[in-house]
Amino acid sequence: MAQKQRQIRMEQKGALASMQALEQRSDDELEAERKHRAAAQALLGARAAERYDAKACRMHYQKAIAAARPQERMQLRRMADASLALAERRSGDLKAAVEKLGQEAPSSRQLFLLRLTGLLVPPPGASVALRARGILLMLLFVTALLAVGFGIATLVTLPFGGASIPWRVLIGFFVLSAAFGVLYVVGRRRQAKARAARAG
């Protein structure tokens, strides 16, 4: 019995090692992978989940589970559950699925952002009412951002005698664009550091 458990652990370790080795490959290279097909398809499924493409995510994990050895299928199903929860923006299910994988659950801030994304951009196949709600919320969000930018521009131009409304709108737009640009760059750097830490 102990020997069988040791063999299963070694095989699981081999599967995980092959996934880590394949992480740097492009999507086309992963599609062409034959030796470690299950690991390659699981990686493609995870990447599809990061793009919020639930249909592609489900398809890749189905292929991964079909190509996997019996002792690897449970872990792949758990990975599929977590990835599909992310792709479909189901924050509560994502937390539970990640914990089942034995990994640290996303922070409450990350779950809130995922929930907000689900409200603003409903998954494909959502009802017309949900899509209309998403469009309305996006319009309200953009209007609120423009109002904040307009307020900042008004405060900035007050010491210089103020500015006309069109100029304040334009200045506010540039201020917000610069702020989002900085946030984007910082976010990309954090993601790169997180990937490097996982690879290391």
Image (cartoon, rainbow, N blue to C red):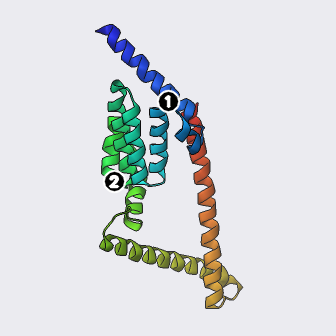
Which residue is the site of mark 1?
36
Label 1's element?
loop
The residue at 37%/18% (across/down) is: 8
Which residue in the rendered view is the most extreme toward the left?
1
Quadrant in the picture for residue 153:
bottom right
Amino acid type, callout 2: Arg
x and y, in percent, of residue 183 in the image: 59, 59
Name the amino acid, label 1.
His
Percent from the top left, x then y, of residue 190?
58, 47
106 or 6, which is in the foreground? 6
Asked if residue 90 lies left or right of residue 176, the reply is left
Which label is found at residue 89? none
* Disc 1 to disc 2, C-alpha distance: 30 Å
Question: Along the line of sight, which residue is nearer the eye, 36 or 165?
Answer: 36
Q: Earlier in the sequence, mark 1 or mark 2?
A: 1
- Residues 65 and 164: in front is 65
* Left or right relative to 156: residue 3: left
Q: Quadrant of residue 10?
A: top left
Question: Is 186 placed above or below 71 here?
Answer: below
Q: Residue furthest right?
A: 160
Of circles 1 and 2, the one toward us is 1
User: Is residue 116 something that shows in the picture?
Assistant: yes
Residue under numbered circle 2: 90
Q: Position of residue 53 (x, y in %)?
A: 44, 54
10 Å crowding of disc 1: few (<14), some (14-19), many (20+): some
